[in-house]
Amino acid sequence: MKANKANAIWNGSLKEGNGTLKINAIKEDLAFTFSSRFGDGKGTNPEELIAAAHAGCFSMAFSALLTEKGYKVKSISTEAEVVLEKHDGGFKIAESNLTTKAEVPEIDKDLFKELAADAKVNCPVSQALSGVKISMQAQLV
């Protein structure tokens, strides 16, 4: 299987410092700071990248399940909201909330919901986040 790598560099103290994240597929470094992680500062943060990974992984897993059942998927749009909470003197990723909308012609709504629930539990990123509460809202459009 393919192994993926990313790199992080942090300079300085936690609150005044700054860092860059490097993802091999992206040419530019992604900046992150204390304020981009815990406030509204410019840049990204680890939780935003986890949210992107979860949304992408879920969408692909859901598409695979729908295709296995013989449905032609027109589109799947998923947003993941990863929640970071203060916990026992530190911080913890507490939840990932998925909201997905999919256009899948001729599918029964109950089967649609069942396959979405299966993808939520079994996509690799959901499995990696097994210690986190994962919720999902799925809408057939």
Image (cartoon, rainbow, N blue to C red):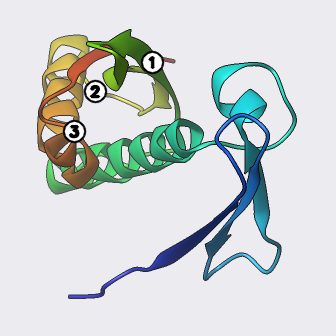
Q: Quadrant of the N terminus?
A: bottom left
* x and y percentages locating residue 102 in the rendered image: 47, 29
Dot 1: element:
strand
Which mark's residue is nearer the viewer, 3 or 2? 3
* Residue on which the image places disc 3: 129
Amino acid at pointer 3: Leu
Dot 3: element:
loop
In the image, farthest residue toward the front? 13
Residue 107's disc number: 2
Quick check: 14 left or right of 111?
Answer: right
Residue at the spot 72% in from the left edge and 55% down from the top edge: 12
Sequence-first disc among 3 and 2: 2
Q: Is residue 140 above or below residue 72?
A: above
Residue at the spot 27% in from the left edge and 48% down from the top edge: 125
Is residue 75 in view from this perspective?
no
The image quadrant that residue 131 belongs to is top left
Residue at the spot 29% in from the left edge and 87% down from the top edge: 2
The image quadrant that residue 98 belongs to is top left
Q: Residues within 10 Å of mark 2 (few under 14, many from 20)?
A: some
Sequence-first disc among 1 and 3: 1
Dot 2: element:
loop
CA distance separating discs 1 and 3: 12 Å
Residue 83's disc number: 1
Amino acid at pointer 2: Ile
Q: Between residues 66 and 135, which one lies in front from this camera angle?
A: 135
Q: Between residues 138 and 7, which one lies in front from this camera angle?
A: 7
* x and y percentages locating residue 116 in the rendered image: 24, 28
* x and y percentages locating residue 11 in the rendered image: 72, 61
Q: Between residues 115 and 71, which one lies in front from this camera angle?
A: 115
CA distance separating discs 3 and 2: 29 Å
Sequence-first disc among 2 and 1: 1
Amino acid at pointer 1: Val
